[in-house]
Amino acid sequence: MTDSFSTPETGFADLLRRHREAAGLTQMELARRSGLSATTVRDLEQRRTLRPTQRSVSGLASALQLDRRPAIAFHRAATARTERVTTAVRPVPAGRATVSVLGPLAVHCGENVVFLTSSRQRALLARLAISAGSTVSRAELLEVLWEGEQPQSVVNLLHTYVARLRRTLDSGGDGRAGVVLAYAPGGYRLDLAEDQLDLLRFRRLVTEAEEVADRAPEQAATLLADALALWRDDPLTDVDALAGHPAVAALTASWTTAAVRYADLLDRCGDYEPVVGTLRRLAGRHPLNERVHGRLILALGATGRQGEAYAEYDGIVRRLADQLGVSPSTELLAYHQRLLRQEWTGTSQSYRVPVPQQAPASVADFTGRVDELRQLRELLAPQAPRTAQRPAPVCVVAGPPGVGKTALALATAERLATAFPDGQLYADLRGRSARPASTGEVLARFLHGLGMSGDRGPGDDETAAALLRSVLVSRRILLVLDDARDAAQVRPLLPGLGGSRVLVTARNRLVALEGARRIDLTMLSTTEALDLLTTITAVRPGGDLAATLRVVAACGHLPLALRIAGVRLTSRANCTAPDLSRRLADPRRRLDELRVGDLDLRATFRSSVERLPASAARAFRLLALAPTPQVSLEAAATLLGRSTAVAEDELHQLVDASMLVVAGPGRYRVSELLRWYGRELAERHEFARDRTAAVARLAAWQNAVAVDRHRLQRC
């Protein structure tokens, strides 16, 4: 072999790699020929080991069958003075700011440390950095920086912190920091290059590893080793404002996922030692994570530490029983069997369990619903055992059409991602559609997401439901069932025993669903509605605040109506808040104005009314004719021309369908927008004489009540 690979600048790592590739050898093959471990060869090529022993160099030269001159150059390169350079780190130009979030927050400008003394400034930078390149809403930044009650000048204070952060990141004073902290519609965005943020480098390496994993597992393992080397500790533990934040929890989960993938790739290669330290580290942080502990058990056994492996298995089995009351999952049992049989190499693919993440992303401009988010978090994933309230296996979010049930469910699923390590299953049940999703269709989707192909699936719905319960019993998965038609559609999809939970949205309150906890969504408060509208339009209410408030009132604080109004304000060049408020002022034209694209408030209302029984639909139409949105049971009975008992049954059908709300004992209220839609339907479906008679009955009854009240007062 010639010495054409060697130049005065060639380092030993590059020379070793070039000779190995020229010989057509993989790292594993070279390791076997030279009597070294694959880890040693990999560390030499990646410059993790800078001074190999003479024995190692001689073994490599012999395995590579180097001639005399190339062998001399090979030995000289091995003894030359070198410096470690990892493939995960690239040099940063002088004066450029770098941010590190894969551990405690760290900021440098060139070689100088940038000190952020303000805790809120640190929290602001950390929150923007973990979403680098994406807009973080103003509402979320305010929630992060000011826990609890916010000062009146909170928006101005946020602007001040942003301006100070810009100056701090450009502390070199020469404008070369390379950081763009920009205002974006609805919030702010931090733009950093890959060489300025360790998180971006980590994601790039993980992506590259996945691209080559199937055809080159050794190369993929090398890339993941570099990605994992970027982690210094748990992310942002020194930023108290982000403790427990969903974005930080998701970041930690990506660390765990990468380590598990790294272990699987090394398993395929038959090389376990490099991953033991990483898995030990993560196992200590996640004492109940069966995926991590299973792979640690295998790696310990494969590296001759079988006593530790058995102790590790016994420990997690005991913790699962004591803390969760569950048995080991199928995956963990499979790793235990491999330990018993001493099956070390190349079989991990058979035991990889898919982690479904089927829930769509939540809307970027989601705002408000703080209390409801807290309630759902406590019900679905309590932080600690409680005596007063047991975890609810099923939560139903109900409410009138357009109130934001799906948006709340998806925001909840996003925030609870780490509480359900085995993933999330999602199905749109199409309850308001003429063709709702069938049980078999949803079960097939869920089983497929859990890794069960069609040819292994069951032949009927009952068998499929039983199989789903069997698969879920050893997993902790959140099932999101969106837009349920009724309780009968939901029941076959519910898990049995185990740690899985179910979140259902429905216009129907699903009162027949056994054991469910319900959260009834109502209209947004004025503050929440205003914040939603201004977030959608990315315009702060300044001189047009009064007009904007009129738009909010005309929309009835209903999220869908506010979204339509926001889209109109942003998509039509000459549409302003004063103009839109004038258009919405006439309640008879309001529903005509509240539609844009495929967003149509009238169509949304129609889909709910069409699902009502005929008697309840008639009651809804006639109640809309009342002079006020709130009526008593007796007044409603008079208006409907029904007995009190029959009227009460019809009213409660409307309450269960979220078309009415109970305003107090014996009192009911319909929202303003639904009321005007009901009047439209009354004019279309009720004869004029019937409408006139209903209103006359109510007026006569009210007069009689007033006369009786006056007589009693005189007595």
Image (spheres, rainbow, N blue to C red):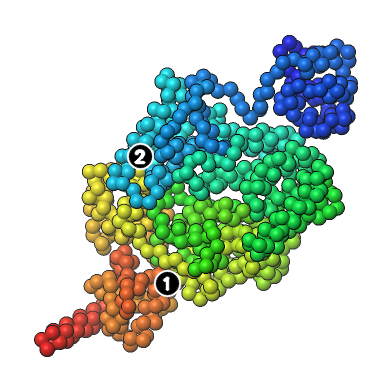
Q: Is residue 497 left or right of residue 216?
A: left
- The residue to which callout 1 is attached is 657
Looking at this view, is 518 or 573 the one in front?
518
Q: Position of residue 81 (x, y in %)?
A: 72, 15
- The part of the image, by quadrant, that contains residue 183 is top left
In the displayed structure, would residue 586 be above or below residue 93?
Answer: below
Q: Are marks 1 and 2 in contact (CB under 8 Å)?
A: no
- The residue to which callout 2 is attached is 158
Residue at image point 62% right, 67% down: 495
In the displayed structure, would residue 606 be above or below residue 10?
Answer: below
Residue at image point 55% right, 23% down: 92
Residue at image point 31% right, 64% down: 673
- Describe the element under mark 2 as helix, strand or loop: helix
Q: Position of residue 145 (x, y in %)?
A: 40, 43
Residue at image point 23% right, 73% down: 627
Q: Is residue 440 left or right of residue 30?
A: left
Q: Can residue 472 be seen here?
A: no
Q: Position of residue 164 (x, y in %)?
A: 37, 31
